[in-house]
Image (tube, rainbow, N blue to C red):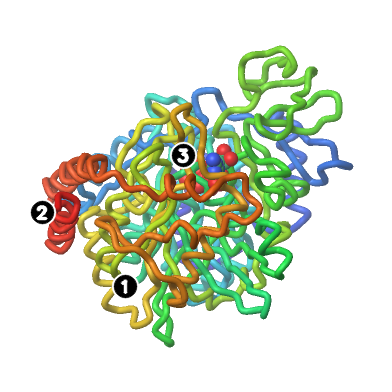
Amino acid sequence: MTNNKAVLQWIDEVKALVNPDNVVWIDGSKEQTEALRAEACSTGELTKLNQEKLPNCYLHRTAVNDVARVENRTFICTSKKEDAGATNNWCDPQEMYAKLNALYKDSYKGRTMYVIPYSMSVVGSPFAKIGIELTDSIYVVLNMLIMTRAGKEVIDALGDSPDFIKGLHARKDIDEENRYIVHFPEDNTIMSVNSGYGGNVLLGKKCFALRIASYLAHNEGWLAEHMLILGIEDPQGNVRYISAAFPSACGKTNLAMLIPPALYREKGYKVWCVGDDIAWLRVGPDGRLWAVNPENGFFGVAPGTNVKSNPNALETTMRDTIFTNVVLNKDNNTVWWEGLDKNPPANAIDWKGNPWNGQESTEKGAHPNSRFTALAANCPCVSKEFNNPAGVPIDAIVFGGRRAKTAPLVYQSFDWNHGVFVGSAMASETTAAAAGAVGVVRRDPMAMLPFCGYNMGDYFAHWLTMGTKIPKAPKIFNVNWFRTDDEGHFIWPGFGDNMRVLMWILARCDGTVDAVETPIGYMPKAEDINIEGLDIDLDTVKGLLSVDNDLWLEDAKGLREFYNKIDAVGNRMPKELWNQLDAFEARLSK
Ligand code: GTP
Ligand code: SPV
Ligand code: MN
């Protein structure tokens, strides 16, 4: 399919190592995709679902020990440890290559090597970057065909250029003890072995579009972020764009596809989804910050997705979708997950592949991190700008996380540098998206803790520098949809009603609403959050906006420890953030 010497030479090297029975180039054609689906169904790798109700939809179950990203087995291998920093696992590249090569040796014996040329962002966009993933998994191929622009068009666009990201994936034995997700940013190389799950193996996503891309972005003067992008159209037809970084399973997909509450809908407001997980941002010729979503689909959390919470996502999954680790309803060959409706199937197969009676079982039928892989083009609210190679201009950047207590519903940073501080101070309760304990508060700056491909101190410095390079910089905000009452219930209704908060954010960008200055930033007056049509009253909003200085001082202590930890490897914490932290504590102690 190509004469590109760099590509062919690399594939030859890998072939000699992994020893495949044959090699298949993925061209992106309907015929090839259909044949691969059929083959995967014949081996049980995929189950074909009810084609009347769910045309072109399939189900896949991963191994039970392989259901989420594995952060403790994810490495950034730069020649110097300081360049990976304190928040990444690091290993000397030569040592790691030796260890991995031993694992990959002959790992494709009896298997086929699929060569997937793919582009992150629209082919031909100034944002676009090309990768090639080698894999022995049809599931990976079919997911990559949804999540990226993949096939012949991409290898043609690459031409003779050696400028592509190498990705090598081998399922091997799905052995947890020997699972590795490794990045060599200096070599534009990603290696993943012993997993068949999402973020570990769809190498265009977290591995390339965040870890490798953030490293490139630092060197090249742009940003690669764990952010959704949405547009809010007003009744006059003007669309304003917001990007938002929340940690994994903290509401990006839901916010990106929200349906405005009736009061806004009736006036003619609309919300458009540009992206639900990753944004690449560059300064445009007009001095604004422009963003593209480098992906082509959504790898979304299934549980909790329903007609009320996210009808757009649900509609998106009605065709051309691969479901992973959800329940199979044997009566009608459709799928189910917790939170879809109140009627779990009785005659079903759970995510582990065992018989499951949803009417009686106390165990979950779908894994909490079960997912759908669906085409953005099938989303009812996909933005008209989705394929615009120039991207969309961003007015506001929003940070947020799951905080039961400390963080209020929304606040605005004083300026860019303070906004970078606010992002650096993010913390959130852990979720099922990564292996490990769930519900533990941990620091997760800019929702990038697991995804920053270099030293977090350098990353903060890069954000500060970017602020000096964007003449018309977005305003920076922080939100928290997850404050709970004493019984542990969420106080804020969330989902579509989050638009009420976004409207305050846009009003602040326009300078049409006042704010109250507090130690943490500018806060809304309670009456400026529109609660028309909601079940909550002004006092509840006041509660959601309350700031407890003592809790924040505690938090600042944790942040200081975190800064110290980052600084311990390479001394790269910017002075400006230390100053911000000092000033923050001083304001709180006043
Ligand atoms: P990743 O794909 O892992 O990056 O996750 P994400 O950030 O896109 O999270 P997603 O939108 O899939 O939401 C994850 C979980 O949070 C789901 O179970 C949602 O139901 C829940 N959730 C999303 N938005 C809200 C909200 O506004 N309020 C509450 N209470 N829950 C929410
Ligand atoms: C996340 O964990 O943030 C995801 C899912 O978006 S994964 O692709 O597994 O990283
Ligand atoms: Mn994510």
Q: Which residue is mark 3?
A: 18
Most extreme residue toward the right is 52
Q: Amino acid at mark 2?
A: Asn
The residue that appears at 78% across and 26% down in the rendered structure is 329
**Residue 177 locus on image (x, y percent):** 38, 24
User: Which of these two is toward me, 454 or 418?
Assistant: 418
Residue at 67% x, 68% y is: 269
| Residue 221 disc label | 1
Distance between the Cα atoms at labels 2 and 1? 21 Å
- Residue type, label 1: Gly
Q: Find the distance from the CA under tag 1 to the CA under tag 3.
A: 37 Å
Q: Which residue is mark 2?
A: 571
Q: Which comes sooner in the sequence, label 2 or label 1?
A: 1
The Cα–Cα distance between marks 3 and 2, rounded to whole angstroms, is 40 Å
Residue 100 vs residue 386, the one in the foreground: 386
Is 148 above or below relative to 559? Answer: below
Which residue is drawn at the image coordinates 12% and 61% (left, top)? 575
Report the side of 473 relative to 134 (left or right).
left
Q: Is residue 573 left or right of residue 237?
A: left
Upstream in the sequence, badge 3 or badge 2?
3
Q: Is residue 417 above or below residue 581?
A: below
The reply to whether residue 53 is in sight is yes
